[in-house]
Image (spheres, helix red, strand yellow):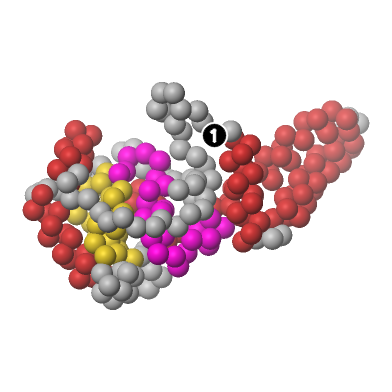
Amino acid sequence: MANIFKRKNKVAGETKEPRFKTIREAYSVTKSVKPWIGAALAAIFLVVWVIGISLGALWGHPVYAAFVSLPMAILAALFFFTRVAGRAAYSSIEGQMGAGASVLMAIRKGWTTTPAVAVNRNQEMVHRSIGRAGIVLVGEGGSGVRGLLLDEKKKVERFAPGVPVHEVIMGDENGQVPLRKLQRHLAKLPKKLSAAQMREVRNRLKAVGGLSMPIPKGPMPKNVKVPKR
């Protein structure tokens, strides 16, 4: 699965993807969803730069101000781009089968996700994530996903008794978690397990795998970091 902000590769012998290529891919996806992004970035860059030069002219140093305000203009455009690109990435996969798994698997650190540990004939499914907060079961689909969540909760409680199990249903209705807020929701869950306990839970549930399923392709926004307590 592609990711706008590529996961840092810590495996020896593997190379990191060039940053320029990552930005280019992110821009391509964003432009397909937001065709006006190019004009908006150019406008923001020029406005910030012109303001900087104008202030410098008032102080009698327009050339110096142009050099100083140039990186500020670039940073302003990049900041705007990252915000828009994040929303565009979610829009590009929203509504697709396995969108929740795609977002969960994009979390860079602290979580391990097994997609589609339970699926029914209506293509409603449950994904399982394990982190310091315990086990998180994320359901996506219609009303039938509640039954899948209940069955999966009973299963993981047999393999990992006493470990906190959180149930999440994706959606925009009351009590549900929208796709774009899924990573943030996991980040806010209180830590209950030590690093050693988390590894033990992962090992216990390793045998309870998921199903082979297609994951929506396309860049994912940078994950939120789980805050330290």
Q: Residue at x 69, y 45 (%)?
A: 77
**The image quarter in which residue 143 lies:** bottom left
Q: Pick out the residue farthest to the top.
A: 12
- Dot 1: few (<14), some (14–19), or many (≥20) neighbours within 10 Å? few
Say whether residue 155 is visible: yes
Whether residue 110 is in magenta: the answer is yes
Q: Pick out the residue farthest to the bottom.
A: 143
Q: Residue at x 19, y 33 (%)?
A: 196
Say whether residue 193 is visible: no
Task: Return the residue nearer the eye: 64 or 101.
Answer: 101
The residue range painted magenta reads: 87-112
Q: Pick out the residue farthest to the front.
A: 212
Q: Amino acid at mark 1?
A: Glu
Whether residue 56 is in magenta: the answer is no
Name the element at disc 1.
loop
Residue 119 percent coordinates (x, y): 26, 65
Q: Residue at x 45, y 67 (%)?
A: 95
Residue 34 percent coordinates (x, y): 65, 60
Quadrant holding the C terminus:
top left
- Residue labelled with disc 1: 17
Residue 36 located left or right of residue 150: right
